[in-house]
Image (cartoon, rainbow, N blue to C red):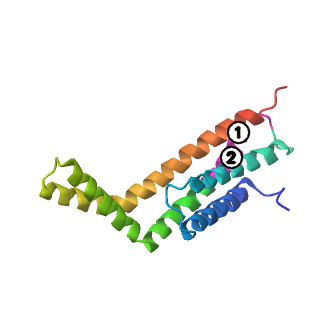
Amino acid sequence: MLKNLSATKKGLITGLAMIGISLGIFYSGQPFDSPLQYLIYVAYAGGIVWTIREFSKSEENTNKFGAFFLQAFKCFIVITLLMVVFTFIFNKQHPEFKDNMVKAYTDDLVKKGNSTPAEIAKNIESAKDYYLTMLISGAIFGYLIIGAIFSAATSLIFIKRK
């Protein structure tokens, strides 16, 4: 049943699994720096490997790096889109994350002691204004870079020598 899926559908399935893992970790009360977070990346890599592995068995396989990478790209671009949308919605539903960031940033600025109260207030306002933008930018670039690295490495592994 899952063998004849397109790379984009595999990306959809993988992205939804990653969202499920993220929600499971969050609602189980695990801290953000929990080692369980690596399960999300294991699922990400697994989706890319699944896509390339199935493509390597297909008649469309030209045994070229570009063909393998293209299939992986179709998968990881869908995953990236899903994870960015998830990050946006999840953070909109949990404004306490922004509040926690503001508190930690304020504490850090005060602890450093090299800013005036007016500078601290200005920096905090900027951080509040750009919080979601920076978070989304980080998610976009992070997932794209990791996806490209996993895709390139897996593509190289699956190239068959003639």
Labels 1 and 2 touching (C-beta < 8 A): yes
Picture coordinates of residue 60, whole percent (x, y): 82, 43
| Label 1, residues with CA under 10 Å away: few <14, some 14-19, many ≥20 | many
Picture coordinates of residue 122, whole percent (x, y): 19, 58
Picture coordinates of residue 53, whole percent (x, y): 79, 45
On-image quarter of the C terminus: top right
Q: What is the three-letter code of the residue carrying label 1? A: Thr
Q: State which region is magenta.
A: 62-78
Which quadrant would residue 145 be assigned to in this image?
A: top right
Q: Is residue 97 left or right of residue 85?
A: left
User: What secondary structure is found at the residue carrying circle 1?
Assistant: helix
**Eyeballing the image, is 55 above or below 120?**
above
**Eyeballing the image, is 74 above or below 18?**
above
Residue at which label 1 appears: 154
On-image quarter of the N terminus: bottom right
- Magenta stretch mostly in which secondary structure? helix
- For image coordinates 63% across by 66% down, the residue present is 20
Which quadrant would residue 26 be assigned to in this image?
A: bottom right
Answer whether residue 69 is magenta in the image: yes
Residue at which label 2 appears: 72
Q: What is the three-letter code of the residue carrying label 2? A: Ala
